[in-house]
Image (cartoon, grey):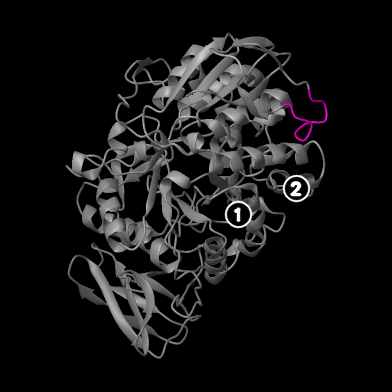
């Protein structure tokens, strides 16, 4: 392993090297089972010590100015929870088999977002590993693991993580996670890890006992104080989070990252922390690409511009406009941020062509202009979805899109997603229209848990369906075991209709995406979209001569779509009997396609 850690505890020579950042402390002591040793002050506010005779599996903690003991903020494992002693972990003996792995090119990615705890009934790394082959069989090329920083309790989305270097102990051991990633690589799957660098969780965050400078009191986020990336002692904080990303990259062979809510990673320095981090990560793995994705509501082109052009150099950004427009059209959502969108198919066509819709127009929800010009960005820069953990789990009842619209419209939206030029992302279970919701769940201590439950229900008081306090009582309690268990996928559904047919549709579309030159085309200017009727959009994907494809997509209601020419060859229809037991195939007469209900046809266009 060419990278050498500089924080935490790592076996070194005949013992273990310990190092922690505590710039305001007068003393830091290492607490072991049989003894307590002082750490030596080092330049930059660090304390370190080499201790011979220790080994992986031994427990330790720190005292800071006589207070404690506290867990290590860079602990690699918290076997008894985030409030307990840390454990020494040695990643070096793990028998990796992915030496020839060079990562998937970004243009090949079809991302599957999953939460380890609810992806299977067992909720472990090992159980998830056993399901990877089914994802490959479907046609997926990457998995995105929701945050893996250990958290308090037995269940959490992961965005309340506090032990940033320690995989959640309830999912398994560090080597269990390594086996999951090693197997993913063997099967041809890239692995992205979702990381949270905009705030720290409310329970079990011990960084404050080491330094008050981890957080910025003047930088608020919806979850509390922001991370101090540009104030006093910011260098130590920047190093901590840079080291964290490097540790996932090298100790676990991750292929890249999805950064949570980057609009709240606040940094006024000339080079933004994430741009600086992009340089460091890629320089540390010159042998393979490192994929970087931002979740950012600003539609900010700077994120996607190359570093040489003053950008952050990221590969992708979650492009929410497309999701919000499709949901407004199909499910009628109009509250919260959906107020900024219409049912206009013409607006959706603009988004499909540009990548996002808001390019500087006023947003009523945000109270000002939103977005920048996406001209010159690559189609694959835009990560598109019709569902993700936020858009399901942040609903009061955790409904998936397939719970709220009919199956025909869901199939049509699926075709649009998988034929669009952006980088598609699926949320676990989407591919078979899973029956389980994805609810918000936590397992905090009683006092905090009560506030979370009350806050969750209060959050929806302005929504029309929950203005009545009695209606808000229907919102599942995040702290209840039943809320978590209801969110776990039921894999036996895959073998039953209508779920089997839906999965066949995803598999067929993903196979076409891998095989058809027009759907593989990643250059700008090689696609166009237009409104074909009040409920329909057409999407042209231009390949070389004779390989162009047209998707005729009736998203809502019945309607007719007029083609520019006749004799188009049907490649796939979402109304085939292999996809649905009640197929109602559209009819084609000359240049006219007539849909009796929502559906999509993928056509090969002659002479193009």
Q: Nearer the viewer, residue 68 or 30?
A: 30
* CA neighbours of label 1 inside 10 A, class few (<14), some (14 to 19), many (20+): many
User: Residue 241 occupies which quadrant of the picture?
Assistant: bottom left
Q: What residue does disc 2 label?
A: 490
For residue 2, side relative to residue 348 (left or right): left
* CA neighbours of label 2 inside 10 A, class few (<14), some (14 to 19), many (20+): some
* Residue 358: image location, x then y, percent: 38, 20
Q: Is residue 130 part of the magenta span, yes or no?
A: no
Asked if disc 2 and disc 1 are in contact, CB closer than 8 Å, the reply is no
Q: What residue does disc 1 label?
A: 116
- Residue range highlighted in magenta: 575-583
Image: 21 above or below 491: below
Q: Is residue 578 part of the magenta span, yes or no?
A: yes
Q: CA distance from mark 2 to mark 1?
A: 14 Å
* Residue 167: image location, x then y, percent: 51, 62
Q: Nearer the viewer, residue 427 or 260?
A: 427
For residue 14, side relative to residue 464 (left or right): left
Image: 174 above or below 524: below
* Residue 316: image location, x then y, percent: 39, 40
> Split into 4 quadrants, where in the image is the N terminus?
bottom left
């Amino acid at each position: 392993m060419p990278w050498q850690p500089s924080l935490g505890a790592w076996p070194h020579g005949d013992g273990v090297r310990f190092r922690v950042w505590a710039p305001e402390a007068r003393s830091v002591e290492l607490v072991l089972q049989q003894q307590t040793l002082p750490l030596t002050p080092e330049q930059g506010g660090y304390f370190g010590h080499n201790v011979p005779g220790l080994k992986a599996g031994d427990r330790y903690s720190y005292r800071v100015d006589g207070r404690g003991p506290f867990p290590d903020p860079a602990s690699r494992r918290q076997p008894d929870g985030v409030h307990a002693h840390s454990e020494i972990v040695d990643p070096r003996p793990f028998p990796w088999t992915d030496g020839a792995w060079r990562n998937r090119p970004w243009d090949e990615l079809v991302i599957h977002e999953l939460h380890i705890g609810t992806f299977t009934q067992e909720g472990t790394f090992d159980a998830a590993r056993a399901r990877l082959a089914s994802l490959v069989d479907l046609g997926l090329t990457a998995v995105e693991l929701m945050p893996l920083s250990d958290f308090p309790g037995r269940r959490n989305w992961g965005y309340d993580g506090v032990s940033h270097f320690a995989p959640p102990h309830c999912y398994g051991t560090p080597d269990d996670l390594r086996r999951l990633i090693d197997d993913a690589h063997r099967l041809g799957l890239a692995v992205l890890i979702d990381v949270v660098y905009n705030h720290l969780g409310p329970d079990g965050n011990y960084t404050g006992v080491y330094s008050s400078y981890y957080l910025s009191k003047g930088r608020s986020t919806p979850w509390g104080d922001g991370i101090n990336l540009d104030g006093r002692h910011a260098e130590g904080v920047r190093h901590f989070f840079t080291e964290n990303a490097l540790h996932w990259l090298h100790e676990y062979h991750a292929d890249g990252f999805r950064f949570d809510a980057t609009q709240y990673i606040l940094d006024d320095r000339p080079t933004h922390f994430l741009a600086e981090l992009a340089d460091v990560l890629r320089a540390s793995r010159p042998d393979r690409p490192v994929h970087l994705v931002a979740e950012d509501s600003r539609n900010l082109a700077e994120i996607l511009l190359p570093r040489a052009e003053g950008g952050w150099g990221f590969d992708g950004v979650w492009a929410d406009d497309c999701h919000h427009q499709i949901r407004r059209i199909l499910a009628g959502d109009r509250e919260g941020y959906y107020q900024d969108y219409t049912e206009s198919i013409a607006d959706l066509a603009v988004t499909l062509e540009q990548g996002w819709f808001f390019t500087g127009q006023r947003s009523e929800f945000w109270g000002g202009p939103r977005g920048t010009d996406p001209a010159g960005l690559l189609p694959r820069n835009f990560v598109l979805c019709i569902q993700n953990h936020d858009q399901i789990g942040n609903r009061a009842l955790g409904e998936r899109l397939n719970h709220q619209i009919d199956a025909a419209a869901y199939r049509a939206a699926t075709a649009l997603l998988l034929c669009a030029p952006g980088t598609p992302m699926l949320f676990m279970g989407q591919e078979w229209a899973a029956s389980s919701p994805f609810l918000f769940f936590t397992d905090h201590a009683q006092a905090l848990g009560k506030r979370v439950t009350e806050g969750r229900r209060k959050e929806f008081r302005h929504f029309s369906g929950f203005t009545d306090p009695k209606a808000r009582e229907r919102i599942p309690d995040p702290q209840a075991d039943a809320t978590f268990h209801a969110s776990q996928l039921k894999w036996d559904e895959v073998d039953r209709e209508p779920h089997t047919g839906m999965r066949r549709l995803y598999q067929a579309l993903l196979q076409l995406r891998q095989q058809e030159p027009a759907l593989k085309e990643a250059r700008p200017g090689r696609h166009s979209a237009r409104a074909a009727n009040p409920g329909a959009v057409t999407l042209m994907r231009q390949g070389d001569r004779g390989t162009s494809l047209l998707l005729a997509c009736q998203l809502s209601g019945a309607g007719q779509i007029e083609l520019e020419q006749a004799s188009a060859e049907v490649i796939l229809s979402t109304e085939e009997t292999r996809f649905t037991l009640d197929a109602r195939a559209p009819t084609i007469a000359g240049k006219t396609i007539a849909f009796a209900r929502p559906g999509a046809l993928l056509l090969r266009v002659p002479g193009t």
